[in-house]
Image (cartoon, grey):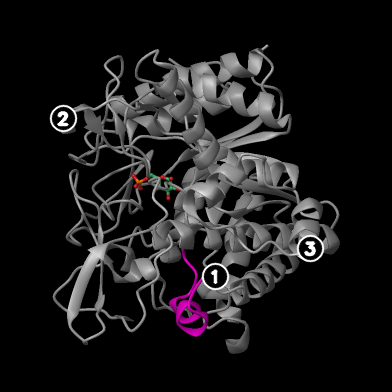
Amino acid sequence: MGFPKGFLWGGSISAAQIEGAWDEGGKSPVSVDYCTAGSTTKRREIWYLDQNGQRAHRYWEPVDELDEGCRFKLFDDLHYTNHVASDFYHHYKEDLKLFKEMGYTTFNTSISWARILPYGMKGGVNQEGVEFYRDVFKTAVEYGMDPVITLYKYDEPVSLLEQHGGWRNRAMIDEFVAFAKICFKEYKEYVNKWMTFNEINIIMPLDGQPSKKNQRNLIYLHNQLVAAARATIAAHEIDEHLKVGCMICGNMSYPLTPDPMDALKRYEKFQDFFCYSADTQMRGYYPPFAKRIWKQYGIKPQITDQDQKDLMNGKADFIGFSYYSSGVVTTHEIDANQTTEGNILGTVKNPYLKANAWGWQIDPVGFRHFLHIINDRYNAPIFDVENGIGLIEKEEDGVCHDPERIAYHREHIKQMRKAVDEGVNLFGYTTWGCIDLVSAGTGQMDKRYGFIYVDMDDEGHGDLHRSKKDSFYWYKKVIASNGEDLD
Ligand code: BG6
């Protein structure tokens, strides 16, 4: 028993969080290029000019569109961590070599739309960007990896937001499909496993109110679901061997009490946040409980006959997901000191779990439980795209000891192995992220996720040299033993 032969092991990163070179190689800006870093207690912020031309800032959101009349703008006195990030753009050969040394058989990153079509379809293809990724994927394949590549990770070119007003406009669907087709055609020689939208459900933490923002998010999400389906259809037409998965932000939570209302609330949260998107992508149509959501929020997305056909014909071939921590749900009054943070969703504290410095609760058993839930629900191949822990770590004398990271992955892999033994159809595991990079939620370099240390901090100090953490050697052993040697 244990992991099947050919199980894919590797790590996951994303364009905007690792590449840097934000204005090099023909790339146009994306919204995180206008964001500064937060901290353990503060989310990151986006800075811009408001309707009166005055400097303004607010919390960053994964689909970040400014209000009408506002303009994206950089300010000289601010430091933007994504501009340099880990500088993968200039270090990718060195980084891929390190991944190879760990024994990766796969690797996940996203393609920056803004490198391929910096100004959308009307601006034409940026060949320099196309060649950059060609070399990344070619090198990865030469190093023995079978890459699984994500098309979109909250980084549409800002120019498209300006041209079309963003995802509320169905013109974004055509723009995305054009981008996807270029990627499938250019890279099919090296990449046969794709994912359309990273954590497509990330705009779904709705707060129960029929507000404009919630209504807007349901429309955005519909347009992205249709775009993903059409891209999937296109991939299958371009090459029938291409497999295209969806990628959903995982959600595992428990009711705080045995009160049936807590149990119901927990289940509805799972339906709203996870299943609304995953069911639609895996089954090809919105689930029946979508009616409850549309009623609650006073809006139903415009679903054309063609959308319905495309959703059905463009079902995902596999389900990818991220899993970091679990949450707790209640209908009862609780004090503010009983709450904590998690990936996108804040939550009630779980007294049985420990958390990292950002309050994300560590729950390896919940991981196994969650794997079973999605295995039972979708009966399809499953790929764990992201699993990891953000930690504050320091390199001293060229060495970084990271026992907490090793412990986190050890316990999660143990539970994952049990789940596989118990019948879960999991075909791969990529840790988030295999090398230090910029956090999406707080914009910090100091929230570290890698097996490889990158010398760069939140203020821009560092020479970007790489060094292997203890976890590097540990993960190498895990991969070499196909998940058997976890000591
Ligand atoms: C995932 C995102 O949900 O969470 C990643 O796909 C992100 O991009 C990861 O980095 C961890 O979150 P954070 O906010 O700690 O970077």
**Looking at the picture, how far across and down is residue 348, in whole percent?**
29, 28
Q: Which residue is pictured at 62% across the width and 77% down the height?
A: 171
Numbered label attached to residue 305 = 3
Q: Amino acid at mark 1?
A: Trp
Q: Which residue is pictured at 47% across the width and 55% down the height?
A: 14
Numbered label attached to residue 155 = none
Q: Which tag is nearer the camera, tag 2 or tag 1?
A: 2
Q: Amino acid at mark 2?
A: Asn
For mark 2, give the secondary structure. Answer: helix
Using residue 202 as the reference point, say whether residue 131 is left or right of it: right
Magenta residues span 155-166
Figure quadrant of the N terminus: top right
Earlier in the chain: of badge 2 and badge 1, it is: 1
Above or below residue 350? Residue 239 is: below
Q: Amino acid at mark 3?
A: Asp
**Residue 130 seen from this side:** yes
